[in-house]
Image (cartoon, helix red, strand yellow):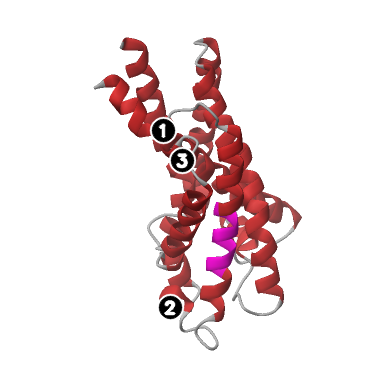
Amino acid sequence: MKTEKLKLGIVVLVLFLAAIGPNLFPIAQAGIASLSKMAVDYLIPSIVLILLLLIVIHLLKFSLLKRQILTGIVAGIIGTVGLEIFRIIGFRIGWMPGDLPKLMGVLLLDQFALGPNTTSNIAGWAYHFWNGAAFGIIFSLLIGRGKLWKGALYGFLIGIGFMLSPVVKSLGVGAFGFQFKDGYQFFIVVSVAHIAFGVVLGWLVYNMNNGVPNIITRLKNVY
């Protein structure tokens, strides 16, 4: 019982730490704090702590939990590649108002007035892919093995959250991007891209998380 409580405690802590990164960009776009400062205060420490927890999990020989977290990271990164295929196409054909990874980069390095360069682009893309990994960790820990449709739904809900966030409002396209061009292009690109992320994530997690418990099972084991 003590071991299960410890595992559950680690899961909750990792979920909290993983949720930090994806929320910083919307917070910054809401004007609450600068992304560059939050990256130093919250983003980097959260990533370091997750890596340290992975070491602790390895030393404690919680092999299923370690695999669950690593699966989420890998699946989230690969899922982001799937997302980017559709996002880049949408951007190239003019159905997206801006290149968000580049925007993330200039905000991360606090050089909005100077514009993007190679260094800021690397920073922006790294942050973008970390957000994908973070969403992957959250999905893997909550769902366990799951089903493909759960991944698709998860990705779609992330997209809906994005289209209602301060990021979209700061781009001047309104909620769901309905004020951009004919009112449907932005919504289609974001929805399809995030569903693609979820499908890839869900498929990989399903195939890599065989025998791994979800959060409900862990709660039942404790209580």
10 versus 130 height, above or below: above
Image point (49%, 23%), residue name: 65
Residue that label 2 marks? 174
Residue 32, percent across and down? 37, 58
Residue that label 3 marks? 138
Q: Is 194 in the magenta?
A: yes
**10 Å neighbourhood of mark 2: few (<14), some, or many (≥20)?**
some
Q: Is 103 in the magenta?
A: no
Q: Secondary structure at mark 1?
A: loop
The answer to the question of whether label 2 and label 3 lie on touching residues, with beta carbons closer than 8 A, is: no
Q: CA distance from mark 2 to mark 3?
A: 28 Å
Amino acid type at mark 2: Gly
145 versus 21 height, above or below: above
Q: CA distance from mark 1 to mark 2?
A: 36 Å
Q: Provide the residue span drawn in magenta.
A: 190-198
Q: CA distance from mark 1 to mark 3?
A: 11 Å
Image point (60%, 33%), residue name: 208
Q: Secondary structure at mark 2?
A: loop
Examine the rendering and report whether any part of residue 213 can be seen.
yes
